[in-house]
Image (cartoon, rainbow, N blue to C red):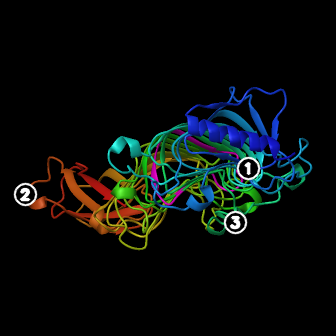
Amino acid sequence: MLLSVAWAFNAALSLGALTGFSVHQPRFATESAVGSTIVLKNGAVWAGDNYLSKIKRLPGHNGALVKSENFDSLTGTSNAFAAGVPERMAIDKITFEGNYQNTARDAYVQATGDGLRLFARKLTLKVRVFNTPGVGVWVECPGGNGPTPLQPGFSREADIEIYTHQTQYEGVIWKGPPDVKCAWILQADAGSRIVADELSGKVSSPTYGAVNGGKCDGIVFDGRGAEIGEIHAFGNFGGGGIDWRNGGRINAGLMIAESCHYGGLSISGGAQGIIAKIDVHRTGGFGGDTTADFIYAGTGGNNYGLEIGVCAIYRQDAAHLGARNGLDITGDFLDIGVVKVDLGSTATAGHGIYIDNDQAQWITIRGGEVARCKGTAPDGLASSAVYRKTTGNGSNVRIEVNVRDCDVAFRSAGTPRLEDIDIQAFLGVGQTLFGGDVRTNNGQRWDIRGTINGVWKGSKVDLTFTFDSTLTTEQTLAVANNLIAAPSFGRITATLVDDGTALTGANTPIFFVGDRDATNITVKYKQAVATGANTTPRVWLHAEV
């Protein structure tokens, strides 16, 4: 009895695949319940009625709701044209209900099983998958153009719209086909639990938990990309938002991760592509977790990497205030047009932009703002707006941002070969423009300036001051430099720019820079011949940190 509905679907889908016609799933007043897996055949087309057509799991059904034929033997296959790979199959606007938890969310009904598992070329998939054990939607197929002639074997055709909500593990696992059209992926509540268990920490995914810190992220792109309009992951209490791992190319209009307890967006491997907009907010910090809101550890596929137009990371005064960084960069080949990092209140401490320059090279951030990075960061240091760290010869980092209300505007550890740091800051009492190691390589270009409680400081200054031309004794003048740290002698230049009408010939003075520290530069001055009247000769001095 429990198998009858699924058997009828399987028979109909098999006939439809053989005859080339679609199977229409009509609108039901109640769900159509199934007690075994529906197998989608090669060439089958299963059409619903604008998502009002529903399939619901019966208790005791421990398998997937839907599988493409040969899925179990094909999963993990690297050849898209291996024997038995189905193609031109479709599930169009059907809702699936997995019966994982009861309506009140106070008991588990069916705690084993899966949603949809598909290995196919040329796939149309427009589905809603709700309240299901296991993974909501697992889509897999490697790339490849296939045998000649090209068109019959071409694998990169798809039309995808996926919405998953309340899944035991990942909402969506995407492993191909790559470079296909995907209008949108909307995912919520991966690692879902009943209300009594909801805030019990991480949920370890059986697929990725061992390599992902024992957590369950909402959407996983595993080595395969796509051309996507919008990606949105939210409300994942057992893990993070989006995990793009093992490379692949994603070109997307908008990528959002919000309200996830253990990080928002993570990118690793040979990732490449263009993302117009990224929005990560209210993520991380649950139970003191220190996972950064956005982790970029990509290695730059084809020495290309990732281009991001606008990247916004903001805490929005989230309830979980564990210290963690905003944008954590340990990978190569990342360009961001405009970045906005705002860590919120004092309690949500962390570095705004952290760059490990030993691993991260060819990084460019062309503008934006970093704000409200305050308190002790996960590494025990005062929170910095921008923290560039290197112990070797890492190089080619360019950062240009405004900074507001951060404990440290720019922190430097080590001295890379090449970098260009341009920071303008507005800071308050107790905050500072700079911390750490001053630059020592000529390839390090810094322009760090701003006000601290109304007092201006910078990494480079131009000063002028005068001496008494009626004296022949050595004159010493300590000039307040307003620099962010003590300058080196190699970065101080002094020039006599106005020697007065009486200072000619034999009475041309000698002047030189003496001592210097983070507060003052000492200039010494002496004339051979005194003048009868004080013409106050003027010296110009340029100094840099």
- Residue at (86%, 53%) from the top-left corner? 60
Q: Amino acid at mark 2?
A: Gly
Q: Which residue is mark 1?
A: 37
Q: Nearer the viewer, mark 3 or mark 2?
A: 3
Compared across the picture, whether 463 is left or right of 95 comes to left
How far apart are labels 1 and 3 at the CA level? 29 Å
Q: Which residue is mark 2?
A: 505
Q: Which residue is mark 3?
A: 214
Q: Amino acid at mark 3?
A: Gly
Question: Which of the marked residues, 3 or 2, is nearer the chain's N terminus?
Answer: 3
Identify which residue, 442 or 355, lies in the foreground.
Answer: 355
Identify which residue, 220 or 447, lies in the foreground.
Answer: 220
Q: Residues within 10 Å of mark 2 (few under 14, many from 20)?
A: few
Can you say whether 428 is above or below 435 in the image?
above
Q: Amino acid at mark 1?
A: Thr
How far apart are labels 1 and 2 at the CA level? 102 Å
Q: Is residue 258 magenta?
A: yes
Q: Is residue 203 visible?
A: yes
Tell me which segment is drawn in magenta: 245-267
Q: Residues within 10 Å of mark 3 (few under 14, many from 20)?
A: some
Q: Is residue 328 visible?
A: no
- Residue at (28%, 55%) from the top-left corner? 541
